Image (spheres, rainbow, N blue to C red):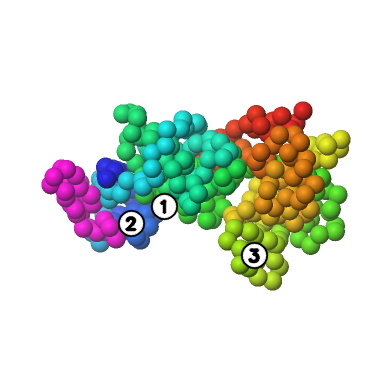
Amino acid sequence: MSIPTLFTYTVPRDFANTTIEAFLLEQGYTKTLLSALKRVHFFEEKKEHYGIEKNGQWAFTVDLLAEGDCLSVYLPMEEENSAPPYDFPLDIVYEDRDILLLDKPARLPCHPSPGHFEKTLAGAIVFYQMQNSSASSFVCHFIHRLDLDTSGLILLAKNRLAASVLNKDMKEGRIQRSYLAFCQGNPEFSLGEIQGFTRLEEKKKKEFNYAFAISAPIARVEEEKMLRTVNFQKGQEALSYFNVLNYFPEKNYSLLQLQLATGRTHQIRVHLSYLSCPLLGDSLYGNGEESVFSQNIGLSRQALHSYSISFTHPIRKEKMFFQRELPPDLSMLQK
């Protein structure tokens, strides 16, 4: 079991005469998390407890607050990560008590799954905790995921409150992730010929910092477990923005910068395939011509990298921005 996590608050004037529940909801606690805090729980054998204290006394979520009250919230303990430990070095970009930001290499799945049970990023995190006495015990909550063959930045929460806040921010579009990708051809050549593919007006270009948009709903292909496709009748809304950073005419591929306004499975891969400009190295959505070219240049995975992320820290409320450049197997494509 992970140890309880403590959060402390001093109640401001605006929350005088409101309930503890109302105050904590404003701090990002979910109804589910609050329901676990309605009663105090004490584990004699471990001398550990979770629940809410007000001014040093155990309290309930219906209790009223006064200005200056001190709240101490002990989050419920969680079951340990179930992934098998994997001796693999983590590339830690940033870590504190509440969040963990990693640079994931390609060919490493996030979670155990059929065919990829033992060697996973979740397992590497378990091993990291086991081997580092300075690393506090925590249960990792993936705020988003990257495909097996996608490299780059991935954000995790280390407790239930941070996960609650970040998951809400992700759902409401307050976490911005940008990708670098190499695709076959040049999407600009298809402008005006494909439904849902548009050039942004100058005003929107300045607002979003992107020149092009693809608004094309995505649905699962019938009787297929993984494969997705653009489907304007049955698909879920999917919106991607991108810039063409460079076009390499002698090799007929482009370097793109992309940002997702929605988070559908395989969204970038499906949208680029829809434009007949599949990712280089994409064995699922590529075509014969692209596959032969990728093999000839020694590219063994899809050319997609999560290179930047911006978000608000879930507890400290500070703006945070991180960026990681292309790994060697993709940076060579710029030469």
Total numbered labels: 3
Which amino acid, by three-letter code, is at mark 2? Leu
Looking at marks 3 and 2 on the same chain, the residue that comes earlier in the sequence is marked by 2
Q: Position of residue 238 (x, y in %)?
A: 65, 59
Q: Specify whether residue 100 is painted magenta.
A: no
For numbered disc 1, what is the local secondary structure?
helix
For numbered disc 2, what is the local secondary structure?
helix
- In space, the residues marked 2 and 1 are separated at their CA atoms by 9 Å
Which amino acid, by three-letter code, is at mark 1? Ser
Extent of the magenta region: 35-60
- In space, the residues marked 3 and 2 are separated at their CA atoms by 36 Å
Looking at marks 1 and 3 on the same chain, the residue that comes earlier in the sequence is marked by 1
Along the viewing direction, whichever of 58 and 283 lies nearer the viewer? 283
In this picture, residue 262 sits left or right of residue 50: right
Instruction: Please determine whether, in this image, residue 187 is positioned above or below residue 98.
Output: below
Q: Is residue 22 visible?
A: no
Q: Say which residue appears at 75% left-offset and 31% top-offset.
A: 334
Return the mark for residue 67.
none
In this picture, residue 332 sits left or right of residue 46: right
- Residue under pointer 3: 221
Q: Position of residue 177 (x, y in %)?
A: 59, 44
Q: Position of residue 124 (x, y in %)?
A: 43, 37
Q: Quadrant of residue 193?
A: bottom right
- Residue under pointer 1: 164
Return the mark for residue 33.
2
